[in-house]
Image: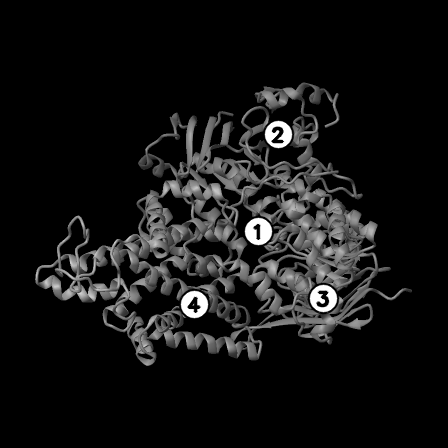
Amino acid sequence: MVAPLLTVSGLVKHFPMTRGHSVQAVNDISFEIHRGEALALVGESGSGKTTTGRCVLRLIEPTSGSVRFNGADIVDMDQRALRAIRPQMQMVFQEPFDSLNPRMRIGTIVEEPLKLANIVPPGDRRDRVAEMLRLVRLDTDAINRYPHQFSAGQQQRIGIARALITGPQLVVLDEPTSALDVSVRAEVLDLLSDLQEELGLAYLFISHDLTAVRRVCDRVAIMYLGRIVETGETEAIFEQPLHPYSRALLSSVLYPDPNRKLTRFTLEGEIPSPINLPRGCHLNQRCSWSEPRCVEAYPPTERYGPGREVSCYRAREMAEQDAVVPDGGGTDAPAGA
Amino acid sequence: MAALLEVEDLQVSYRADRGDLAILNGVSLRVSPGETIGVVGESGSGKTVLVRAILGLLEAPFSADSGTIQFQGKNLLGMRERDLAKIRGREISMTTPEPRKHLNPLITIGRQMVSIIQAHAKVPRKEAIDQSAELLRSVGIPDPALRLASYPHELSGGMCQRVIIAMALAHNSKILLIDEPTAGLDVTIARQILDLIGDLVRQRQVAVLLVSRDLGVVAHYCQQVAVMYAGRIVEQASVSSFFHQPIHPYSTQLLRAAAAARDRGHAETRATAPLLPADRGCAYAGRCALAQPACRETAPALEVHGAGHLVRCWRSHELARGGVAA
Amino acid sequence: MATTPGSVITIAEVGAFDEFVRFARRRPSFMVGMTIVAISLFLALFGPYIGTYPTETALPGDTLQPPSWNHPFGTDVSNMDIFSRVIAAPRIDLTIALVSTAIAFIGGVLLGVISGYFGGGGKGIARYVSEGIMRGSDIIQAFPVFIFALALVGFRGPGAENVIAALAFLNIPYFLRITRSAVLQIRERPFVEAARCAGNSEWRIAFVHVLPNALTPPLANISPTIGFSILLTSGLSFVGAGVPVPTPEWGSMIAIGAPNMMTGQWWTALFPGIALGVTILGYGLMGAGLNDFLDPTKKR
């Protein structure tokens, strides 16, 4: 078994606030990404997925836990060692325009990581830039233009070119298509998919858009209020989500097909604030399957087959009820409740 | 069913330094009770401008140049501000994609709702407060008393949207203009809001114009759909016709892009030209895989293709017959 | 599969020349300002050569002559031609204003970037330095400007260099604050994080990425600062603390001519006064116009 490229263990990030409170953004999560694998981190606001992405690249300092990249723990490194590793792990940002320096030309923007990493002689750098632009399907005469002269989709491609120019092994993508129009999303997602195959990249794909995730990722980890509630292969999770939150999330996806009936597995109420986390399972106030033990202690992570993990006391029960009452998405409440 | 609101050939332009830009270029549609018509298009297509034009909320440099907006036998376009004010919020209401921005941050929700209620009805304060609480309950906000005393920043995005919807319903408006109700909302909350709107529409038999970029929303919450591109409606049909037999090349492209493909399909990678109204010819010609010279010369007109299915494309007949792969 | 970049419906951060011309045409106040500024610069360069009379030596003959064909602005108490002196004055005024503003701009912007980028967070030494800069700036700004200028010049003595030093010192906090507030906003933007991700050191980010984007507000304030500096120079000269007497300078000319106004020779202080007022107005108008032009949020 080859060692994973990235191993995150027990990652915690709390943002301190006034008067002793803190925003508990990430609460003890662990996951692995192997070389060439695309893992999605899915969740809504307050899930902690964005914070996790930034902790993985150490753009934010984790409160505790470890992030091992190629065996070395990033959290412990000093600034110099960290900068030496940066070429290996890059990021694509959510905002197409705002993630580019408006006063720099595209050529300079894309070249910069390469220049700073010093892995290629100066003479060859421009060629690499041109190569990257071609790889993301942009005209090379973009080199002398400015970001505002491009559309959002093109700006995002520039960001991708910049992220890939140093030949990273891991790319963290933070909602890469959320700011794009629907018609452009598919193109960019396909590009990302193709690049992953061509270059053997590992992705940490952070998104709330389940259809995007389905298109690009092999595996999915679903997050809720700073914890991973379910992990598994993409198709398996879409076929049959096991955790109640996963069910609610998946049943909220509106497919552009009026014939596909909507399932009504909804959760009551609002998402609690990460400042005041509910005790025990974070979902207990909204879940119709909630029981006293759900409030007492956070459910342990259980295996449901190869690569499939769920943190819920009653997931097995729910799955069994599915088998009896096939609904194509799970039932709203325990039978007889 | 007789239409409550009929927009006919509406032209709206934007006066820029370099000349006038056509933002809405002859838009026509009708909204009927109990029916939700979805207006779809990408950013820049003119959807929000349409909503604001209907309520007379356009400000310079935008200007509504010509066309009619028929409501109860009167033309809203060109109506005096005084008369429009009587209609806004009472007969016709709107919601907004940014609910929090449209709430006064310095005043409690309760006071804002009361002022809305009292704007169109002589209702004593105590009664207005009770009505407000009832309205909040009807949009699914538990514990309305607490919310009435809260300020907008204390509410989540989803709650703000519910409040805006409640305000839109304060006077039992017959027509609702709902602009991107789920923008910026989490998926599970968005679903709640949409189900809420769906229930309300059914219960009250209002006529709804729903603006959205999301085809999924349109598929499940609308009966009619109008596709806008660069200020024109390029296709209009019932939802089932649209999703099963889209005719206009742009519609096909939208559907393809939105489809949740199980396998990693390849979307059409076409040169994406900017969304600008064309001076002559079809505005979509720059992006269209099927564009012919004629398309760049003259702009096509809307043609009928079966019951209530309108398409604006020179090649629509070929496409309808399935002779061309779009 | 080539895609051609098209233009986007967003407002460019830097206006193009044609836009500038179009903008200028629609703003008569801006054009007036620009004209005045242009004239002042022209006079700064060539003024001393245009006047037909010497500007620093007293002439024999009747003093205090009213405006006439020979002397369009009349003569003053030393029988020097006021017109020649009025148009020669911009040289010293503008030199002082431009040099001091340039120094204040460079100093203020650099300090503003440092205190804006490294301050505010909890980064140890950098934070203390930034706080120190801000408090120092507060102290300077706490004093009434003119009194402070007087004190500084009094400390070092009159003369052009000292006026320059005083004005530069006084204006640094102004540019500092403007730059700092721009920097505070810019450092939150995603492209700064992206720069970090690309491997930039914090210093490099501050000066290569943030600074160029923070220049617009201070640049827009250069013009009004020049105008204000001219005013201050004249004020200092008026009380004898600025440019020494023989050198033509509007403030000192007003001082010399003021007593004569009481005795009926109205031309001695009026013309330099008008010149001063109009010039400062010009710089102010140009500054206001530039500010609007460079501000992408204002609809044009």
Amino acid type, callout 1: Gly
Quarter of the image for residue C199 reads: bottom right
Residue at x 65%, y 50% (from the top left corner): A106
What whole-number distance in Å separates the C-alpha atoms at marks 3 and 2?
A: 43 Å
Single out the mark in the foreground, 1 or 2: 2
Single out the mark in the foreground, 1 or 3: 3
Estimate how packed mark 1 is, as few (under 14), some (14 to 19) or many (20 or more) residues with alpha carbons within 10 Å.
few
Q: Are marks 4 and 3 on the same chain?
A: no
Residue at x 39%, y 30% (from the top left corner): B77
**Would you name the residue on which mark 4 appears?**
C104
Estimate how packed mark 3 is, as few (under 14), some (14 to 19) or many (20 or more) residues with alpha carbons within 10 Å.
many
Q: Secondary structure at mark 1?
A: loop
Tag 3 near tag 2, CB within 8 Å: no
Q: Is residue B81 above or below residue C93?
A: above
The C terminus of chain A - image quarter? bottom right
Quarter of the image for residue B291 reads: top right
**Would you name the residue on which mark 2 appears?**
B284
Can residue B137 be seen in the rendering of this structure?
no
Report the chain holding disc 2: B
* Mark number displayed over residue B184: 1
Amino acid type, callout 4: Ala
